[in-house]
Image (cartoon, rainbow, N blue to C red):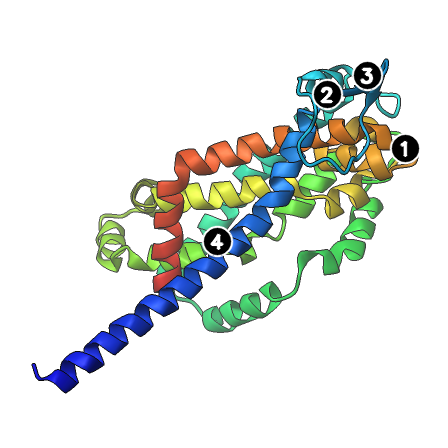
Amino acid sequence: MNATTKKRVSSQSRNRRVSLGVTYTILIILGIIWLIPLAWIVLSAFRCEYNGDTFIGTVTSNFFPKAYGLKNFKDLFTATYYGVSNAFPRWLLNTLIVAVVDCLISTFLVLSVAYCMSKLKFKLRKPFMNISMIIGLFPGFMSMIAIYFLLKSIGLTGNPNHPGYSMIGLILAYSAGAGLGFQIAKGFFDVIPNALVESAKLDGCTNFKIFQQIILPLAKPIIIYQALMSFTGPWMDFIFAKVIIGAENSQYWTVSVGLYSLLFGTHPDTNLFTQFAAGCVIVAIPIVSLFMWLQRYYVEGVTAGAVKG
């Protein structure tokens, strides 16, 4: 290697190091910016400050609290909000019920549609895939008003005689169109050899039996990925829950609607900010725990499905 070549290689190596340094610096700065609000909410959840005998639960300019404690969490779980005693545990249970039921229904629908689009050949298959891709470009809340009036017409929202039916309506709103989000699961199923499906058909297996006994046991990563997505959507959603359940049915609110109403509802109380922050921390714990526990399968499902799809 002559001197000119060595100089060129050295220059390229130096430029690469500079480029990587700039990239990492920008990412670190952005990471810090994104983490600051999260850290502030967590610190506010544990803030336990008093002005004499009066507890200070409002927003303060102090990033780090002067005193820490668990009072906000205790008050959150025992207080009465909007006429509902132990309201936060009730809202948390409502959210869990909706999220788990939607997770089961949506995961089954998505995987079923993905299997059909991946392993079955039929007319209008490609046009249907194209249409589903186009529909997926539009945010779901664009259909919110239409969904609300459809549910209202069959008594699943705004029903004064059966206010609890709104939870059924909310589950339907989340899960009814879930099958259109089959693209990543289809990409994963495309990786599974078609020879397995064909040999099973020769042995007399039905499509449902093939799906149940051959495809699903090989699709653990994408099942976990889809289950996580189907669970986290209802767990964190605010817009559909607010519209479908309604402001008057406080005992059937989900946790996002309930926490929002503490500060911005019909009876807002700015002194409940620290309890609001405590609720945010509690809501985040299940999601973070699930992702940490199942992240390996989540990554496998996303990469295999996205690359092939």
> Could you tell me the amino acid type at mark 1?
Pro
**Image x and y of residue 22, in percent:** 43, 65
Mark 4 lies on a secondary structure that is helix
Please name the residue shown 80% across and 38% down the image.
Answer: 245
Q: Quadrant of residue 67?
A: top right
> Could you tell me the amino acid type at mark 3?
Ser
Q: Earlier in the sequence, mark 1 or mark 4?
A: 4
Q: CA distance from mark 1 to mark 4?
A: 52 Å
Q: Which residue reaches farthest right?
A: 266
Front residue of 136 and 82: 82
> Could you tell me the amino acid type at mark 4?
Ile
Q: Earlier in the sequence, mark 1 or mark 3?
A: 3
Left or right position of 254 against 236? right
Q: Which is more foreground, mark 1 or mark 3?
A: 3
Q: Earlier in the sequence, mark 3 or mark 2?
A: 2
Front residue of 187 and 263: 263
Q: CA distance from mark 4 to mark 3?
A: 44 Å
Q: CA distance from mark 4 to mark 2?
A: 31 Å
Front residue of 91 and 198: 91
Task: Look at the picture and state if 77 lies above or below 109.
Answer: above
Q: Earlier in the sequence, mark 4 or mark 3?
A: 4
Mark 1 lies on a secondary structure that is loop
Q: Which is more foreground, mark 1 or mark 4?
A: 4
Which residue position holds label 3? 85
Which residue position holds label 1? 160
Q: Which residue reaches farthest left?
A: 1
Q: Are marks 2 and 1 in contact (CB under 8 Å)?
A: no
> Could you tell me the amino acid type at mark 2?
Cys
**Image x and y of residue 169, in percent:** 73, 40
Which residue position holds label 2? 48
Q: Which is more foreground, mark 3 or mark 2?
A: 2
Left or right position of 289 against 18? right
